[in-house]
Image (cartoon, rainbow, N blue to C red):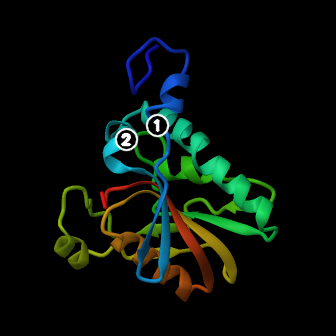
């Protein structure tokens, strides 16, 4: 097989060299309303890998990215904070055989961090890719939350563009008694 990032022969979907160099994280935090959103990469650095979420090979790519980012992050976070924290993925609908956001949330499972799979689902299945802010505002996701109430949670998504989806998700969770600590995403489209 070949590395999906550099096309060299590799036993893994992303080779060891690419994990070390090409995919070195460029972590950043962006404030969206009252929500802190931590992202591991700039979207432009990973665009071709992130777009595989619509393909069968995306399962292995997202799993590798989650192992490189989300898993180490939550282990470090849990070491410094011993409370139970729930992990809530944004819109974990299954497509092409898997839910790419569920792969990210699953990687964060520990004794003190518990994923609540498919507990926050959009009722409006409109696609935002390539759409402007006005379109996003006129077509909200209309989330429905069916998970536990009165908990501390980390919100997880793959990409942040305008932040509208994460803000709407946060509002629905707050209305359900969920204390959203912050959000995690693989990539931030904002280049600033």
Q: Which mark is residue 171?
A: none
Taking 61 as reference, is 150 above or below it? below
Circle 1 Cα neighbour tier, 10 Å, few/some/many (<14 / 14–19 / ≥20): some
Q: Tell me if residue 164 can be seen.
A: yes
Q: Nearer the viewer, residue 142 or 163?
A: 163
Quadrant of the rendering where the C terminus is positioned: bottom left
Q: Position of residue 139 (x, y in %)?
A: 24, 74
Q: Residues within 10 Å of mark 2 (few under 14, many from 20)?
A: some
Q: In the displayed structure, would residue 171 be above or below residue 37?
A: below
Residue 111, above or below 182: above
Would you name the residue on which mark 2 appears?
46
Would residue 15 be visible to someone looking at this image? Answer: no
Q: Position of residue 80 (x, y in %)?
A: 77, 64
Residue located beneath label 1 in the image: 23
- Residues at discs 2 and 1 in contact (Cβ within 8 Å): yes
Residue at x 49%, y 54% (from the top left corner)? 27
* Residue 22 percent across, percent down from the top left: 43, 33
Say which of marks 2 and 1 sits in front.
Answer: 1
Q: Is 67 positioned to the left or the right of 96 in the image?
A: right
Label 2 secondary element? helix
| Total marks placed | 2
SS at badge 1: loop
Give the camera-side residue of 31 and 177. 31
Which sits in the foreground, 85 or 141? 85
148 to 119, vertically: above or below: below
Rendering quarter of residue 150 = bottom right
Indicate the quadrant where residue 110 lies: bottom right
- Of labels 2 and 1, earlier in sequence is 1
Side (left or right) of 162 relative to 159: left
Determine the CA span between mark 2 and mark 1: 8 Å
Please name the residue shown 40% across and 78% down the image. Answer: 168
């Amino acid at each position: 097989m070949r590395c999906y990032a550099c096309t060299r022969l590799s036993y893994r979907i992303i080779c060891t060299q690419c994990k070390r160099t090409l995919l070195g994280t460029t972590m950043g935090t962006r404030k969206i309303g009252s929500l802190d959103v931590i992202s591991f990469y700039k979207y432009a650095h990973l665009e071709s890998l992130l777009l595989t979420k619509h393909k069968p090979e995306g399962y292995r790519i997202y799993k590798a990215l989650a192992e490189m980012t989300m898993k180490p992050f939550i282990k470090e976070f849990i070491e410094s904070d011993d409370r139970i924290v729930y992990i809530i993925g944004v819109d974990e609908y299954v497509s092409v055989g898997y839910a790419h956001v569920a792969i990210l949330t699953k990687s964060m499972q520990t004794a003190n961090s518990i994923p609540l799979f498919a507990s926050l689902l959009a009722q409006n299945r409109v696609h935002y890719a390539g759409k402007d802010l006005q379109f996003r505002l006129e077509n909200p996701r209309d989330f429905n939350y069916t998970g536990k109430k009165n908990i501390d949670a980390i919100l997880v998504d793959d990409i942040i563009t305008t932040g509208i989806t994460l803000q709407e998700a946060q509002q629905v969770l707050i209305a359900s008694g969920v204390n959203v600590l912050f959000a995690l995403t693989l990539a931030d489209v904002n280049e600033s």
